[in-house]
Amino acid sequence: MATRIVRVDPELKDLIPGFLNNRRQDALTIRAALAQEDMETVRILGHRMKGCGGGYGFNALSELGGILEQCAQNRDSEAITNAVDELQAYLAEVEIIYD
Amino acid sequence: MQYRVLLVDDDRDMISLLSAWLQEAGFEVDPVMSGSEAIARIDVIRPHLVITDLVMQGMDGMTLLSKIHRQNPLMPVIMLSGKAQIADAVKAMHLGTAEFLTKPIAKEELLDRVRHTLRLAAGESDSGLNFGKEMIYRSEKITRLLEQAKLLAGTDVTVMITGATGTGKEALAKAIHEGSARKDRSFVAINCAAIPEQLLESELFGHEKGAFTGAQTKHEGLFQAANGGTMFLDEVGDMPLGLQVKLLRVLQDFAVRPVGSVRGFPVNVRVISATNTDLEQGVKSSRFREDLYYRLCVVPLHLPALAERREDIQPLLNHFLERVGQRDNMKRKRFAPEAADYLVSAPWPGNIRQLMNVVELCCALTSTDIIPLTMAQKALRDQPAHVQTLKDAKEDFERSYLVSVLRVTNGHVSHAARLAGRNRTEFYKLLKQHHIEPEEFRSSRQASEED
């Protein structure tokens, strides 16, 4: 897993809290979807996270999004649980430097 | 000038991110979260550029692209995708997308591609100054047509060129190729009407060794030869129906399967087609597949006949006189003023090709530096407007023969049939085929005798 310190473009400073909150919400949605074996929702959320994480400066979120998307396609519930654990840990610990 | 960008994505975070980047770079951004909203907004805000995601809930990016280009064929569109699928990228490019970018995307890359696309759309490409330099024209009609073609050259959109024989369809296709990013790869042209069906399939798609009698070696076919470049399908309206299905499959799958092969080979070819027939009529009469028509005719370009742009005739005459002089290493001849006036006002049913032949003939048969009116008149008279197909020529001959025999026999069918070496029934059948009424050749007395 990548480092928890992330450097972000100051121009995006206003958007970051909302972006990270949406990822926290994604983690909850993915767990709920997993409980109902709704792999399509997991895949879509993983795909989106992969697409936009790096753009905001969070390459680790793009990596995790890619893992979630792949695991959903493989219907690998255990790997999805591990990835969501990792996602929530990352979101709890990440430190942001705007420069 | 502030450029307006219509941004289409069903992911709110992506919309926020791209809007922030674009606004910071000075663009005006109008974000929407679905393809249907985008369609509704286009006519209202008239954006300079559309950026759309490929995979979206509801209408996907590919459908949106098709809908946009149906109404606004030259609207530049950048497509973003979360998956680097080559087939998607190639399909999007053929449908006219200007750029296909894979997410996650870096800010500088996006802004670079946006600026590049807008520059191309404004006709400021590096090759723009030389675009269509091989085409000779002065008319407003061709100027406007080339402006459109120049914009299309910057994209990979599939173009269909319509126009009568000899109007310069291949020259225009070549100009588009030369002005495109594919210019360093092959431009392959084939006339679909000139080659029999069995041979055409092998020519286009290739064949394996032993695929049919006479296939002694493997042949890769023109689509593979044009890989990375442009394929020009001339007279595509004359392509047999059986081959139309195979061409459609190539355009859908971006792969060719040679005759006798069990596997396909991926090809990345831009297709420009041309026809001098009314393909919409061909579709109505089931001679041309509708699905193929829409695949080929994403953007239509029409080349007007020479008689509709007479201001181009004088520059064309000068160009061909110059070319003949250089080729034959002779002093450049010129037309006497009255000869030039005569040629400018001539009907030119064979268009530029006919004009070129007239210049050739005049230069060859005139020993002086100035070509007189009489020579121009003779050359134009001696030039057939176009070469008929064998079938048309046979039909014309048959009709004219039947008319002469009926004239000789004053419309007496039995006599005419005897002269023609046919029995009466067969002869009547031929007359019916050609809609010839023998009564029209008879005097009233002969008519009553025959009846």
Image: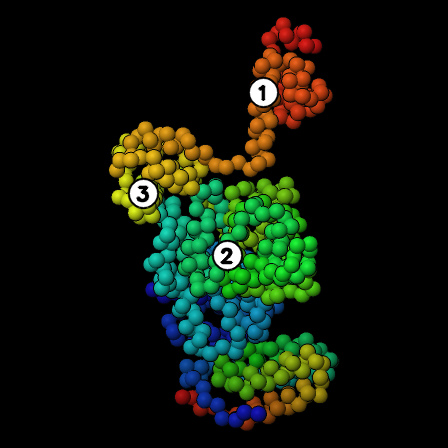
Can you tell which quarter of the image residue A46 is in? bottom right
* Along the viewing direction, whichever of B378 and B82 lies nearer the viewer: B378
For disc 3, the marked residue is B321
Q: Secondary structure at mark 2?
A: strand
The first of marks 1 and 2 along the sequence is 2
- Give how far across and how far down residue B384 sits, in percent: 45, 34
Q: How many marks?
A: 3
Q: In the displayed orientation, state which residue is furthest to the right.
A: A36
Category of crowding for the residue at label 1, using alpha-carbon neighbours closer than 10 angstroms: few (below 14), some (14–19), many (at least 20): many
| Quadrant of the drawing holding the C terminus of chain B | top right
Q: Estimate the x, y position of residue B433 in percent, counting from the top left.
A: 65, 27
Amino acid type at circle 3 is: Leu
Q: Are marks 3 and 2 in contact (CB under 8 Å)?
A: no
Structural distance between the alpha carbons of marks 3 and 2? 28 Å
Q: In the displayed structure, would residue B409 be above or below residue B335?
A: above
Task: Kindly identify which residue carries mark 2.
Answer: B188
Instruction: Say if labels 3 and 2 share a chain.
Output: yes
**Which subunit holds the residue at mark 2?**
B
Position in image of residue B323 (x %, y %): 33, 47
Q: Residue at x 55, y 67 (%)?
A: B89
Cα distance, mark 1 to mark 2?
45 Å
| Element under disc 3 | helix
Q: Residue at x 41, y 56 (%)?
A: B150
Relative placement, left or right, of B15 versus B437 is: left
Residue bearing the label numbered 1: B403
Confirm whether residue B100 shows in the render: yes
Q: CA distance from mark 1 to mark 3?
A: 42 Å
Lower sequence index among marks 1 and 3: 3
